[in-house]
Amino acid sequence: MKQRAGIKKPLCALEVLYNNGKGIIYMNIVLLGLPGTGKGTQARALSAKLGLTHVSFGDIYWNEIGKKSILGHEVTDYLRAGKPVPDWLVLNTLKERFAAEKKGLVMDGFPRSTEQADDLETWLSSRSSRLTAAIALKISETEALKRAEGRRVCRGCGAIFNTVTMPPAKENICDLCGGPLQLREDDNPSAMRNRIMSHKDQTEPLIVYYRGSADFLEVDGAQPPQAVTDRILAFLGTLKGL
């Protein structure tokens, strides 16, 4: 997805992809990778840096489970078993939650299949937008399992920490709100193995899909989080000719 010929240079803010004469088009970024690669960490960093909206269906669904909503009830069995939520339900959630969103999106672990990727492209096109880049974070399965075992989520504000890569200042206490940290249900070893198997079956073909249809970057996710963020930002800058 190269910069289109004849389009004016982007405005000064990095989050703006281009101005097509009819309006500003904002970046839309997909983050891919095994569970535990740091997609959520990078999505939050990019959202803060670029002014984008973080889309995490995992966060949405676990929040709905906590509220005991109808949607939470629909997805509970899938998430607790580490199985993918059906495509139709994910797409409906995307349309309902982000239909009015005006900013660009950074998608954390979505899409998870080529079918979802096609649905995403169709939805973006209906919004007179498009995908800017797909970024794959690569770590080994062993490292993914190790990181998942160390992941802790704040029950108060939802902030994520990791005893391996990003530990809190005080054990099991959130640095941001002081709330208790807990292990997410789908980070248990059995669910994690299911999620990794699902990734191999469905998500890995997305690497091939996006190599051929989008500006694509593969990053070593075993690096320190800031180094990964810096590499992604440098890559996005080259797409815009900055």
Image (cartoon, rainbow, N blue to C red):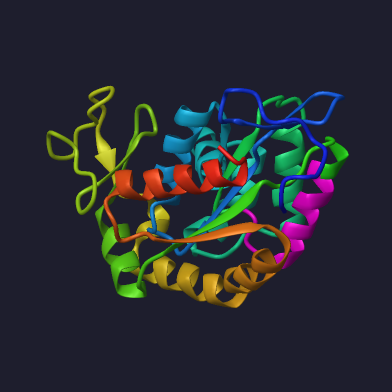
Between 217 and 120, the one nearer to me in the picture: 217
| Observer-nearest of 182 and 108 | 108
Residue range corresponding to the magenta coloring: 110-124
Q: Is residue 168 left or right of residue 5?
A: left
Residue 162 horizontal side relative to residue 27, left or right: left
In the picture shown, does residue 172 fall above or below 121?
Answer: above
- Per the picture, the main secondary structure of the magenta-coloured stretch is helix
Q: Is residue 113 magenta?
A: yes
Whole-percent x, y for residue 167 in the image: 19, 43
For the point 75% across and 48% down, which residue is it? 91
Q: Is residue 232 above or below residue 98?
A: below
Residue found at x 50% / y 41%: 59
x and y percentages locating residue 92 in the rendered image: 76, 44
| Residue at point 35%, 72% (across, down) | 140
Residue 115 x %, y %: 76, 64
Residue 239 part of the magenta-drawn span: no
Give the vertical position of 8 relative to 197 (above or below). Answer: above
Q: Is residue 56 above or below residue 164?
A: above
Image quadrant containing the C terminus: top right
Front in this rendered view, residue 81 or 25: 25
Q: Find the residue positioned furthest to the left.
A: 170
Count every numbered label the image shows and give the total: 0
Rendered image quadrant of residue 169: top left
Q: Position of residue 75 (x, y in %)?
A: 61, 51
**Residue in the foreground of this view, choosing between 167 and 226:** 226
